[in-house]
Amino acid sequence: MKRTKVSRRNVLKILGASSAVLAAPAIFSRAYAQEGGFSVGIPGGYEKAFQNAFLDPYAKEFGVKPTPILAGTSTVEIKAQVETGKFFYDVRFSVAATGNEVLSAAGLLESIDDIDSADVRAIYAAMPEAQRRATFLPHGLSAQVIAYQDHLKFENYADIWDPKKLPGARALRGQGKDSVEAALRSMGKRPSETAAFLSNDDGWKQVFARLDEIKVHVTNWWEEDSDITRLLGAREVDVTAFPHHRAMAAVESGAKIKYNYGQSMTTALGWVIPKNSPQAEAGRKFIAFCSRPDRIAAFTQDVPMGPMHPGVMALLDPAFAAKLPTHPDNVGNIEAEDVAFWHKNQGKANERFKEWLLG
Amino acid sequence: MTAADLQWQAGGTAVRSWRQRSFVSLLPLIPAWAFLLLFFAVPLLFVTGASIFDESGSLSLQNFIRLVETPVYWRILLNTLDIAFWSACITVVAGYPLARMLASGERSGSSLLMIAIMIPLWTSFLVRALAWMLVLSRYGVINSTMLSMGLFDTPARLVNNYPAVLLAMVHGMLPLAVLTMYSVMQNIDPALTRAASTLGARSGHAFWRVYFPLSLPGVASAWLVVFVSALGTFIVPVLLGSPREMMIAGSIVEQINNNFNWGFAGALTCMLLGATLIVYLVFERTLGSSVLSGGAASSASTGTGKGRVQQWMRPFGTSILAAVGTVTVFFEKMLEPVLGRRRAGNGILLSFSAWLLVAFLVLPVVFVIPVSFSEDRFFSWPPVGFTTEWFEAYFTSTVWMKATLNSVLFAFVSAITSMLLGIPAALVLARRSVPMRALLMMLVLMPIVLPNVIVSVGLFYVFAYVNLVGSVWAIIIGHTVLNLPYVIITVMAVLKNYDVRLDHASWTLGASKLRTFRLITMPILRAGIVAAFLFSFVRSFDDLSIVLFLGAGQLSTLPLQLWSTALVGIDSTLAAVSTVIFCAVCVVVVVATRIGSKK
């Protein structure tokens, strides 16, 4: 019988070799940190656009190449990093304004409003006072648009709530905040009126009564933007409200849908730096670089979020710019969500909403 | 049953001598439990620990009080248990004929059977859900076919309801159930059934009164594995269900991700684990201990409640099986004039239902193949045009290739690790009376029940202390936590029918313990070990959150890449990737069975 003998020496050899192979990437990653480079957390799906608009130009200009890190849910990741002191990214891209509210309230973020850059100041200045946050610098706006199959015509939320006039499969996001806001729009309330209207239980009752009207006509309570994009593209759903840049990308890719900015509520997406990040200084420099109008314009061409820097529109192709929510033609239709209100009420609202959904 | 009793009385002295060496004989358990304690229980405390504090950081029961007072979570928990229960029952019943057919070892078509079983196992959970969308959606395969044939006037609503969720669950879980049952059935001596027929039993009786009871350990552990796996799902109900199919794992993840309420997430986790524990205890007390967790060991402790319940139940079981046998024989006799005695007895129904299941397993995934060549980017039916764009995107990208290699590496190493830890533990658990068995079993089941996010977040805190975050080891350990339970349960199931006297005989004949293990135990365990390896490999191959979090974004795997492209929602690379995996699995299985049959 010819067989390799299982001797102590052989086993040790195998163990040694395999652990060397397995340990290699760990060694690499530590070497990276020593070079004085820094890492940027980027949500899945944006890697290519981010590389072209920010990482490569930054490396070209400063000779330091930031490491892109594929990131998941910002809140969990940043909490774990700050609490353990083990940072796998020094800057995080594209955190929602609500996410910043949560993280900042928990003291998990560095202030970045004092970055010495005219572009950063310009972006802050362009925001309404109530929405400025020291720990959060927006890089773009995501606006909810009403999107529908192109043989139909939905103009506003009241149309979504009118299945007699406009039959079809409706979809809403299966989250309390999104569905409550949609119901409020259908009642003619603006995003800035949400807090006042929901300040007492009577308001909540009215909203849920309004939701009752639509419940049976909603075929999909979706969770992820990507899911609803697919559902619209595959004609599974006739009408929904979802982010404008998703709608634009879907149309670009051949989806037979139309959309409009009627009563559009916006969410700001922006940069944050985790508290005590060892490379915070490098991160601030990177954020300043990425806030330059030419960089935002380059990113916007790939991922068409609404630029908030007033200098960006002029750099974009006018026909393309006209489709963006922050374009002068659309800006009258959009209004920012009440981040402070939802930070306080999101959990309760969602619980009540889930109970209603199950009922 | 009396035979078993006699055997036990005879073995009484043996039991006593084991007792003296009980500590030594329990040693093989230690690595597995030390591993689970260190890398699962401790990390879990980091996540659930928050549940006993209030916002100000002082000790408080407020999270649990709120949980008790909020009926919505109880309803979601009931939903979860309901879906998991029925998924497990349907999967086991549906999978039985397939497992039996596989175990009967007919050469013809056995590799096709294997491919069919492997397909859903190897397809990413996301692709599986999307494949069902493709089949069931408004303009999906079924509706568009029916509409074009004029059978429907308007598209039927086949998705976003309870049956759709069950269908997709059963589809995803069938491989698990079939392979678990198969590994037990493989060791049932076919001579027993033949002996029954020689003694005049018709095949209906021979099956129900001889074969079926012997296969019960497989059935029970298959049920348990599917049940606990189903408890932790949340993608399927979101994509294919309606709000009525909301499941608790989704609520836990939501509390952590959206509401940033770790305390309440911890309370919900405790609720889910508590419910699982109750179901497990009921399971143990009724069918479980007699069939899964070492009947031999537990009957040693006679006089316990467990023993009494079983003794009380056993005659009922026997008469039920006898009755079912009689009914089967009645049908057999009815079919006889049509089919002839031999064919009726040989279970034409069995093979019919088995092949029906094969179609069920393979078809949804087959529909993904044309979609991977479609120019349409929304995973929709029917495919439009023809393009190899998605395959090019996969094969020409070093990122994708590296991710694929990483996935295979992690899966392989973590599967081997969990076998090394799990098999010795299973051997002891199945054969010895182990103190606090229910507690230990619960620790084994918990990693399957909880959403991976919980495990990975907890592990992050542990690994941060030892500077392992972002290393390959972090991922391998994380995956081993997920895999180990499958190894232990599957191997335990096979061991249930294992006759310890074979070992004794071997020792008597002068073989050493190691030699006995290698030449006697291993060959009998082979099917179970192969199944355990497969489950481990696939579970690691399909994980997203551990790689994302513990890999600290530096290590990419196939699921991570798939997830990242799927997030855009307008990319069919994932269809192409699943087509590639489909072909790879077919090739591997065909080659493996060729080699196997040559031997």
Image (spheres, coloured by chain):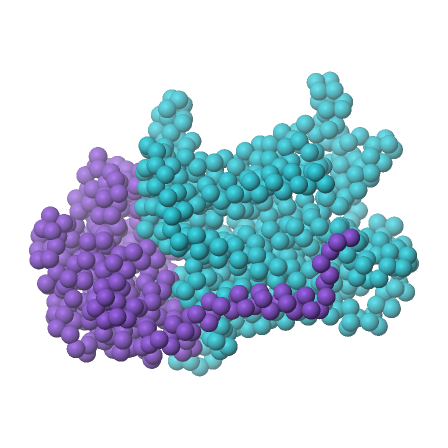
Q: Identify the image quadrant of the C terminus of chain B.
A: top right
Q: Position of residue A182 (x, y in %)?
A: 25, 53
- Residue drawn at x 28%, y 60% as measured from the top left: A51
Asked if one can make out residue A74 in the rendered structure from this viewpoint, the answer is: yes
Q: Do we see residue B81 in this rendering?
A: no
The residue sitting at the front extreme is A2
- B149 is higher (above) or lower (below) than B60: above
Q: Is residue B378 left or right of residue B182?
A: left
Chain B appears what colour? cyan
For the point 40% across and 61% down, the residue is B254
Residue at 11%, 57% in the rendered image? A315
* Of residues A43 and B264, the one drawn nearer to the viewer in this rendering: A43
Vertical order, B336 against B528 (above or below): above
Q: Position of residue B141 (x, y in %)?
A: 41, 32
For residue B510, what is the image quadrant?
Answer: bottom right
Residue A165 placement, left or right of B232: left
Tally of numbered discs: 0
Q: Position of residue B125 (x, y in %)?
A: 47, 49
Q: Which chain is purple?
A: A
Foreground: A101 or A246?
Answer: A246
Q: Residue at x 77, y 43 (%)?
A: B188
- Residue sitting nearer the eye, A186 or B29: B29
